[in-house]
Image: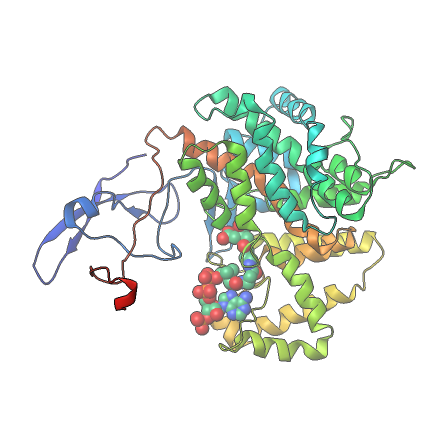
């Protein structure tokens, strides 16, 4: 990875000491200042809570240009992939670095299809949950529990076991997600069908019942596949960084993905799609928009406009643009063109994007702003929205995990801190305090 033919000088003005730090060049986007020797040579740490200016790793998987609203996977733009590819092909691309040839794709999809069944004992594992458990709590638990069932794909030092674990996770997430939904509504589990595509299979397991035939709508299957593509990977976001840090301790891949699901659940991250719909319900009508915009701007009010803003995008999230277009297609197909929540969302977006507070801070709609509206129209309850995000993002997490584990120089992640606590002091017995 080294590509350091340039340096920067760090100079301590008080002592006049200076240090040369290497600059490592990217293939595109910001270069980095290599500070790995900084503490050893200067006794100083750098300080960057929230990692606003820190590259935690090198990666060849996903590139984001937040100012230009660019997102690409292995060099292919998200817009092109969403229009021309399919989710399983994007999975292959993220995992292997290249688009598959025909025979590679067929072998990969047959493999994923083969692993879509779950160990039968997992059905009894689900029985331990209350029916009103949030599906994300079931996903965190059941994905972590997969390590109790698939002992032949736990050795992170064995490339074959790493690949088997990756394929099992991609294959089983739709089955687990559908199970979590069926369990929450008291309906019987539906087994995967090997004759259906990945998205069709997931919709069939989610919405079919044993008592009658269920035909998956091609439009919904296409929309589902596009939603899965749009959420597949996104550089070093909070949940991906969680997976990398968990993986750096050599924890098994199922435990690492479970940690990513836990992090994604937060409303500041993947939980925002559920929070957007709840927010739109709370706003209720266009007349109330200005009241909620004022709340979002009021520093004393913890309320934030869910689905707006992003740490990296200071322009329109390209995924939101694709989803906004899909909204019209899916709602049109379902005959709900005049969906009140879509109208409210579009009015909210229009007002916010004309408001100085949002313009100044470059707060644009992100991927979560429109996704929930489509998912609700497709028949998913809001509690399932982040589950679908986790389903899609599993391939991104496992691809980033694989890239980290394969890195010959990878080491356990162990950040330091700025200590601001008490200075050394003597213990005082309780009756003398
Ligand atoms: C995802 O990282 C990824 O790539 C994530 C993701 C992925 O694919 O993995 O893209 C998925 O998580 C999308 C984001 C979903 N979250 C939300 O929609 C929740 C609402 N958004 C905010 O919580 C916020 O915008 C974050 C968490 C997304 C980003 O926060 P940052 O980068 O830490 O920005 P910040 O909190 O420092 O905000 C900067 C300013 C602040 O105001 P000032 O102190 O400068 O006056 O903008 C304000 C914030 O108060 N602000 C908002 C706001 N988001 C930021 N004000 C009102 N409403 C908002 N939504």
In the rendering, at what x and y percent does residue 297 appear? 53, 76
Q: Which coloring applies here?
A: rainbow
Q: Along the horizontal axis of the image, is 406 left or right of 6?
A: right
Residue at horizontal 72 percent and vertical 48 percent from the top: 130
Percent across and percent down for residue 413 are: 36, 41
Identify which residue, 275 or 351, lies in the foreground.
Answer: 275
Q: Residue at x 63, y 38 (%)?
A: 142
Is 180 on the left or on the right of 406, as rendered?
Answer: right
The answer to whether one can see residue 361 in this image is: no
Q: In this view, does 282 lie to the left or right of 235?
A: right
Q: Quadrant of residue 422?
A: bottom left
Is 301 placed left or right of 180 in the picture? left
- Residue 125 visible somewhere in the drawing: yes
Residue 175 position in % (x across, y down):
70, 35
Residue furthest out toward the right: 212
The location of residue 280, given as percent across then percent down, is 69, 67
Q: Residue at x 42, y 41 (%)?
A: 245
Pick the quarter of the image with the C terminus. Answer: bottom left
* Most foreground residue, 249 or 160: 249
Q: In which quarter of the image is residue 49?
A: bottom left
Number of numbered callouts drawn:
0
Q: In which quarter of the image is the N terminus?
A: top left
- In the figure, residue 77 lies in which quadrant? top right
Residue placed at 55% from the left, 76% from the top? 355
């Amino acid at each position: 990875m080294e590509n350091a033919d340039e340096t920067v000088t760090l100079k301590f003005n008080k002592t006049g000491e200076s240090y040369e730090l290497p600059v490592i060049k990217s293939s595109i986007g910001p270069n980095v200042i290599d500070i790995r020797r900084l503490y050893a040579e200067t006794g100083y740490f750098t300080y960057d809570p929230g990692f606003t200016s820190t590259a935690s790793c090198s990666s060849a998987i996903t590139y984001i240009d937040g100012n230009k609203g660019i997102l690409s996977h292995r060099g292919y733009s998200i817009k092109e992939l969403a229009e021309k590819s399919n989710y399983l092909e994007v999975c292959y691309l993220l995992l292997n670095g290249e688009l598959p040839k025909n025979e590679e794709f067929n072998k990969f999809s047959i493999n994923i299809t083969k692993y879509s069944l779950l160990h039968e004992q997992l059905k009894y594992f689900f029985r331990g949950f209350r029916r009103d458990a949030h599906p994300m709590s079931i996903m965190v638990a059941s994905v972590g529990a997969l390590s109790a069932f698939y002992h032949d794909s736990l050795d992170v030092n064995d490339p074959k076991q790493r690949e088997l674990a990756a394929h099992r996770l991609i294959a089983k997430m739709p089955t687990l997600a559908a199970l979590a939904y069926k369990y929450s509504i008291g309906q019987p589990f539906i087994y995967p069908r090997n004759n259906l595509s990945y998205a069709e299979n997931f919709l069939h397991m989610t919405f079919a019942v044993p008592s009658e035939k269920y035909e998956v709508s091609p439009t919904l299957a296409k929309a589902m596949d596009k939603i899965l593509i749009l959420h597949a990977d996104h550089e070093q976001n909070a949940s991906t960084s969680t997976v990398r840090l968990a993986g750096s301790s050599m924890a098994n891949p199922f435990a690492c993905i479970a940690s990513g699901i836990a992090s994604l659940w937060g409303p500041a991250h993947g939980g925002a799609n559920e929070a957007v719909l709840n927010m739109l319900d709370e706003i209720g009508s266009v007349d109330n928009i200005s009241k909620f915009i004022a709340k979002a701007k009021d520093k004393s009010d913890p309320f934030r406009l869910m689905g707006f803003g992003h740490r990296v995008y200071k322009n329109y999230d390209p995924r939101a643009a694709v989803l906004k277009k899909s909204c019209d297609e899916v709602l049109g197909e379902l005959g709900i063109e005049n969906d009140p929540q879509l109208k409210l969302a579009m009015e909210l977006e229009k007002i916010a994007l004309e408001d100085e507070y949002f313009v100044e801070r470059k707060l644009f709609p992100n991927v979560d702003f429109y996704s929930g509206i489509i998912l609700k129209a497709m028949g998913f309850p809001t509690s399932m929205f982040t589950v679908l995000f986790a389903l899609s993002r599993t391939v991104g997490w496992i691809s980033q995990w694989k890239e980290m584990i394969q890195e010959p120089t990878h080491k356990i992640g162990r950040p330091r801190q700025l200590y601001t606590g008490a200075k050394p002091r003597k213990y005082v017995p309780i009756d003398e305090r």
